[in-house]
Every structure is written in structure tokens, then in C-alpha cells.
Image (cartoon, coloured by chain):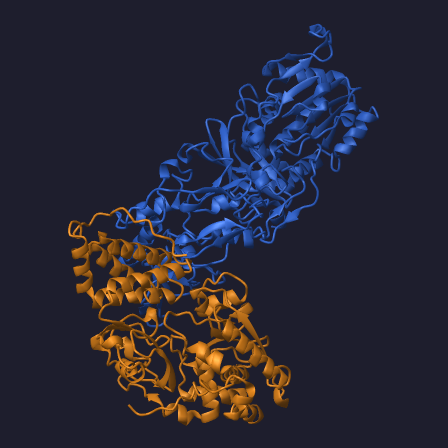
Amino acid sequence: MPVVIVDGQEIEIGADERLNCIEAARRAGVEIPHYCWHPGLSVVASCRMCLIETGQRDAESGKISMVPKLVPGCQTPVRDGTVIVTESEKVKESRARVEEALLIDHPIDCPICDKAGECLLQDYHFQHGQPERRADIQPFHSRKRDVGPTVALFVDRCIMCTRCVRFTREVAGTGELMVSSRGAKEEIDVFPGYPLANKLAGNVVDLCPVGALGDKDFLYQQRVWFLKREANVCGGCSAGCSIYTEHNQDTVYRLKPRENPQVNTWWICDEGRYGWHHLHDEARILAVGRRDAEAGPDRNGDTARRLIPVEWADVVTGLRRDLGAAGRLAVAVSPMLTVEEAWMLCAVARSIDPEAYLALGHVPNAGADETFPGGFTIRGEKCPNRKGVEEVLAVFGAAGHDWHGLLAEVADGRASAAWITAGYPQPWIDEPTAERFTGLSCLVVQDLFETPLAKLATWVLPATGFAERAGTWVNVAHHAQSFRQAIRPPAGVWPEGRLFWNMLGRRGLYDPGSVRRQVAESVPMFAALADELPATGVDLRLRQLA
Amino acid sequence: MTPFKPVLLEAVGVPGGHTLASYRSRGGYAPLEALLRDKQPGDVVEMVKASGLRGRGGAGFSTGLKWTFLPKDHPGPIYLCVNADESEPGTFNNRFLMEDDPHQMLEGTIISSFATRATTAYIYLRYEYPRSWNRLQAAIDECYAAGLLGKNILGSGFSLDIYLHRGAAAYICGEETGLIESLEGKRAWPRIKPPFPAIEGVFRKPTVVNNVETMACVAQIARRGVDWFKSIGVPADPNNPRDPGSYGPKLYCLSGHVEKPGCYEAPLGITLRELVDHFGGGVWKGRRAKAAIPGGISMGLFTEAEFDTPLDFAGPGRVGCLGLGTAAVVVLDETVSIVDFLHNSCRFFAHESCGQCTPCREGTSWSLRMLERIRAGKGRLKDLDLLLELGNTMGMMPGSTICGLADGAAWPIKNAVNKFRGEFEDYIKRTNPEGWMVTEPVPALQIVGAH
């Protein structure tokens, strides 16, 4: 195995690995500071922050010969015997000078900059910078201009790493951003009339190592040091991108991509990035209600449409009672639910009615998948867990049952009660479809927002959004990722899992882990879920082959 | 000095010298015909290697050696680029060659393409040279009409197309890989090396980039022979194993405070004093010289005492300059303030820095700000140390930039401050009697835009 020597420490790398000095040093726990280099973009070696000393150890004599000048770590591949020195005086002086140079034209307006607290320029200045300013003091200015509907550019904060430019050219393939002018006057800009408006545009904000590119959705909303982050999975489509949900006091402020080489590499799409606003939408269904004819007429004299609030403890018994009395049950298992929730829901349904018709809930579809030149794909299927739910259904003998099958069951009168789990952020059912459910003796609807279907329901239950639940989703490529709850749902809302858990008569707090282990034991496809999953998840099919 | 009859500038002053007929009457294209008939590309490479021809663009790298870096038996296309983006301040010899004798460099280009097996050559012409454009395009058209370009040249089976490309009007476009990027239609940001252009150049194909004067020299070597070429110039220094010698005639661009500025041809190794006195008619107005730029502004400065240094590839380096560069000599007379000179130099490089690498982008701009402030009477002695530190740390040699043009920006700073430090200190103390000793940062002056 090739051996690389990082600051005197020998580390082995894979024989086929093509690493640069930054990556090799990282293996040894040594951070080489860098701005322009990004593993997902081409190498330009222009910021010169990663300059290091390198050398080569002769395999036979063991003698080390050093390269006399500094070289960029990003541009220099390592091979067997490569020597990397990251902490010599020469390297430190070089870093200090680059930091000093970058700060000459930087407004240093950290107190009003969104990036402060997670800014590489700040961090590196404290680690590697000069203790005092030697350059002339520049008057403060930080021009701001829009470069697109979601991104604002603070021109003077830019350090010209060109990550954003390379992203739009290499990954998004749209090339809206460019460098204009020359020398210290150069700026990032868009071509006139061509704003930064591609579906991956938000990633340039994550890529920006300083506060030059700001996300207008997040701008001035929260200081980053108040934010807590939870490793989550995006529920926007069946790609299941790994994300961080960044939140404070049960409020989500932004989503960030989480590096996952097997799923989304370093990126997420804007649809996912801004797809958390529904969590805090005021129109959400927050209270449980039951329409009860005996409750008397409402103000308009309409007895059927009146929702009576119910305590959650009474829901557990009330649902079982109402559904049990209604006759044959049809259950839509939403692809927004986790594997654990789907499993418990099926178990609950079968315990109420052993003949219950179980089916995959409505699968929102927005058309064809869209793949970008950099390989990133936005899926047309706008739900995160169709594969997982289908696997669960197969175990319960409901393989192939889908939403249309359930509609037929209901329309043909083969079912007299239905339990529809939904939880879609977008409107998903129209009046004519909902009308088919009118003849049922009991209809339970569990959803985020008011729909034509919810208007007909006997029971209306609130659903929870992606950051409010815990569990496992299986994406379109059979890649399973487990995640924890990032924020608590709004007051008075039980996550679906908690309701099902209680309806199954389980004791204590809802524990997705114990359900997951149980699922893993009984479903061969889910065998890999028995262990704690790595943060990047597992490919279920790989485990099948093994 | 021994009399020398111009060879490269033979056509200057000849009426209609730029035409094909005139060039043929001087013996032009006969060597090409002979060479296409009798020689193999490898023979031509060996010929140029044996001549000791070093690139005339500035770096002085062996031309023949450069050609051998091309991959052997490359299946795809190989490109030849002629760097005619002559934009080093003080330099205008390529312009003479292109305007007065375009066929000479075209013959050199065809021979070089034959040697490197390139079937497409690009001439990247400086944007501001419209006359060169017209003359070159006319000459290329003549060549096509005469069967010297196009398919199956002179029945030899060798084909070549030459495209004249008008440059993007920036100093950085003259940098080898910046030129390549610009030729591809991109912003002229120099590429990181490796891979070098000989492996991956224009359109990611093996590419040779040579200067116009180098091409002219190739034509003359083909016409007059290796021995003629080696009889001119300075042989290798036996004490310096890294010196391959400086052979052949060289075009010196003499300007500044001399009586007769102009482009003169002389053997490599002429001293700067000989050049000024013999060709330039001495310093103008009977004044004394104070300093001179030896080879374009980026090479640094000679003091008057260093005027006896030979202008060959090794000479300027011996007195602390970067090199011979483009052999553009600019003479400063005794009335010139070195502060003004350096300010002007810094302004040029701050304006022309491509802005890719942090040390050059910010260093050139910072040095200009300091010089602006010094000239405004707010200089500090500390600024001289800062200027020197910038000069010493900026460039490809210390490893802090991608291309060598940052070294060129650093050299005038280093040379001016080191060689004329007394004058700088006097100036600062005289103009800023209150604050010359201050070491804290001071408010920056607002610079009037360089555009």
C-alpha cells in the first residue's frame, strides 16, 4: 500500500486512490486550509491558501528530497513516499500573507454579515492570519446586488475563489455566473438578462467560503451560532438527499446539503432546500377532530360538518372503536411515512380488521427525472419512501396494492371504512376523487393541510413533516437512511409513529429503533436495518447480495 | 563593436518588402521547398536544437527542446500557436516583423509546423495591431494562392492551415497558457501546470507556443544554416552548467530617453551601453542616464553602473534582473524619479494582473496603493519594507502564483527599492516630514480608476 508522510506521520492510502495533498492530510487528521478547492469541482489552485512543502522519500535509501518552492496542496497528487509538511515556518508565513492579502479588499463587516460564525475567512484568519493589519485601512463598503431570485451577491466580500462560477458551469451546466473585470477590481457577476435561476442555484451559497453569496431566504433571519443542526433526509423527492436541518427553538431556518457520496454528493436542489416552509405554515392541521352527529348542529345548522376536538388519549381508543365498528377497512399507507411508521400502521390496521385492504398511498409525480451535467438528479416522484412502503406492504401480503386499487375498493363498496394517511406538502387530491369516499361509514384522514378529502372525514388527524419525524426512508435506488427528529412538531401534534405505537399498545415513548430492529428481523430486504446505520445510509440491495 | 548586417530586419525599408514576391527575391521560401522535399520532421527538430535557438518571447527556453516534449506518435491533432500578443511595455519588435516582413515569420511557422507535425497553426495577434493584422492576413492569402499553405503543400504531402486570431487585448493573453485559454474563447486565466501545453494545450491537444521572433529565427536558420546561427552571439558559460549559451541575432527595442529610439538588430550579447551609444545615439539632450529597463518592464532595472552588462540570456540575471525578457530597453535619464517609475510600473501590473491568484491580485493592487500614497506625500519608511516583502513573495519562483507574470510584476519593485533605496527614503522623508516613521496602518487613498 502506498505510504504518505504527513508532518512526520505515516499513513497508508489505497493503491488505486487518487488523492491530492489536502485529502491525504485529512486522512492523517491534518487540515490544510483552502478556499478554492472543492472535491466536487475542478481544480484551479488560485487561492494559494493550501500552499505546503512537499518532498519525496526515496523508496530504497529512505532519503527525503524536498521541492524547494511551495506547491498548492490541491493541485499536487500524492503517491508512495510523498512527504507533506504543513506546519513549517515557510508555510505559515505564506498562509499569513494570503490571509492578509484577502483581507486588504475585504470590508470586514462581520457584525452584519450572515456568514459570520461559519466563515472560512474568519476561521483561517484566527488560525493562520497576521495579528495586526499592515495594509492601509480601506473605507468600509459592501455593495450588494441580486444575481438571481434566491441569491444575493455582496460584491466586496468576495475573495474570488470562483467556486460558484465553476459550480454553475460544471455541475448545473447553466453557466450563469462569470468573473468580470480584472485584478483587484474583478467581480463575480451574471450576464445581463441571465439571472442565476437554475434549480441548483442555492448550492453556490453553500460553496461560498465567505459571505459574498447570501441566500435571500435565510438572509438576516438568524445568527448561525444559534442554529443547531440535525442530520436529516430531504422528503422532497424520491432521491432522498442527505441534509442538515438547521433549527433553533423548534423553528427550521434553513436546510443544507450533507455530504453523501452514495446519494447526493455535495448538493441539493432548491426545491428541497426551500421545501421546509410548509412545516411552519399557519394553515396546517394542528388539532384532532371528530365529526359527531350527536354533538348537535353548528352555527349554520350543519350537523355533519362539525369537528369536535378530541384528546389524543381518546383518539387511540376512539379510532379503534369507530373503525372496528365500520366494517371492512381500507388503509392508504402514505409514501411520506417512514418504514417504521408504515410497518406499525399496517400492524394496527390488521389488528382492527384482519381482512383490511392495505395499499400504497397517493404517489405525487411531477414528471420525468431531471439530471444535470454534473450528475445530480432531481426525481419526478415527489415522495421520499415509496420503495420502503412497498416493501412493508409486501410483507403484509399487499404487494402491488396502490392508490388506484384502494380507490376501486372504496368505489365498488368492498370497503366501508378507510384510513388515509397523507402528509403531502402540496395539494394532492381533487374534489371528484374525494367524492368517491362519501359513502363510507368511517373515514380517517391524516394530513398536513385541509383537503377536499379532509372535509369529508369522520376523523381529521394532523400529520407531521419531514423534520418532525424520526425513522428510515428508502430512496428510489433502494438506499436506506435513518434519521432522527430535528424539531418537535407543533404543540398538540403527535407524530404518526407515536399514535401507531400507542394504538399497538406498546409501552413507554415511541422508539423507532426498536421498531426498526423488529422490521429488520422479519423482512429480509430490511435485514441491514438491524444495525445502527452509518450517517450516509446503506444500499439495501448490496446487503441482499452479501 | 563589429559591424552587423541585419538579417531579421532585412525587409525593413524595402518598398513592398512585405509581399511574397519581394520575400522570394530575398531567397525566401526556397529553404522551405528544399526542406519539404529532402527532410523529415525529425531532421528539422534536430536542426533547430543544434542551432541553440532559445525562445525569443521572454523566458529563453530552448525551442528545439520544447518541440521534443510533444508526445511521440500522437494519434490526434497537434497545434502550433504563434504568440504575437506582444504587450510587454517597451516591446515592439514583433510588430516590425509582422508589418514589414510577414512572410519571414510565416515561413518559420510553416517549417515549425512541419517539424512538430502540426497541421493547424494559430497566430494569436495582439488586439491593438491592426496593421499587422492586415499585412499578415494578406500574406497568408498570398501563401494559400501560391500553394504554400493548405492541402499538400508544394506536393510534399504536408498540409497546414494557418488561422489569424485577434487577441483579447490583455497583457495576460501573452502568457503561454493564458493565450491558449483565450484562443479557446475563454477568459485568459493561465492554466495550472502540469499538464504543460506540449501534452495538453489548445483544445486539450498537444500544443507548441512560440514567439513571432522565434519563428523568424527558424526561417533564417533554415535559410542560412546552423553554423551561421551559432557564429553569432555568446557561447555557453563553461562555469555555469545551466547556461546553454545565447546564439543568433536579436531584435532590441530601444526606447525612452535616447536620441534615436527604434528596433535594432544586433548579435546577442551586445551590452546595454553599446546599444544606447551605438544605435540609440546616446542619452537624449546630452543628459546622463540614471537607469534602464533591460528587457521589458517586468525584467527589473539596470543602474547606470550596470550598463556594461551584456544583453544575452544570462547577462541581466547577473545584476539581479529577472532575465533578458523581450530585450526591450527603456532608458531613464537623470531627471526621472524612481518613485514615479515604480508607480507607473505598479499601475501597469495592478491594471493587468489577471486576478486569478491571490498574491498577485492583491499584491499588485496593494503595491500600487502604497506608491499612490507615497507620491501623495504620505509615505512611510515601513512601506519600503512592505514593498520588498511583496516583491520577494509574489510569483511562480517562490511558488505563490500559477504563472510567471507575477514574478515580472515583483521584479521592478525589488530592483527599484533595492537599487535606489536611498532615493526612496529621501523622497519619503522630504515629502512626509511628520509621518515617515509611522508604522501603524494609515487610511488608504482612493485610487482613481486605472481604466
Residue at the front extreme?
B285
Q: Is residue A329 left or right of residue B388?
A: right
Is residue B392 in sight in this rendering? no
Nearer-the-camera pick, A508 or A261:
A261
Is residue B242 in sight in this rendering? yes
Q: Residue at x 30, y 75 (%)?
A: B294
| Rendered location of residue A177, percent (x, y) | 52, 51
Quadrant occupied by the N terminus of chain A: bottom left
Location of residue B401 with respect to A491 vertically, above or below: below
| Rendered location of residue A514, percent (x, y) | 55, 31
Residue at the right extreme?
A412
| Rendered location of residue A205, percent (x, y) | 49, 44
Q: Is residue B273 left or right of residue B402?
A: left
Q: Is residue B307 left or right of residue A503?
A: left
Nearer-the-camera pick, B23 or B247:
B23
Chain A shown in which color?
A: blue
Nearer-the-camera pick, B296 or A420:
B296
Q: Is residue B45 left or right of residue A278?
A: left
| Rendered location of residue A55, percent (x, y) | 34, 66
Query: In the figure, the orange chain has which letter?
Result: B
Location of residue B29 with respect to A242 vertically, above or below: below
Location of residue B366 with respect to B249 vertically, above or below: above
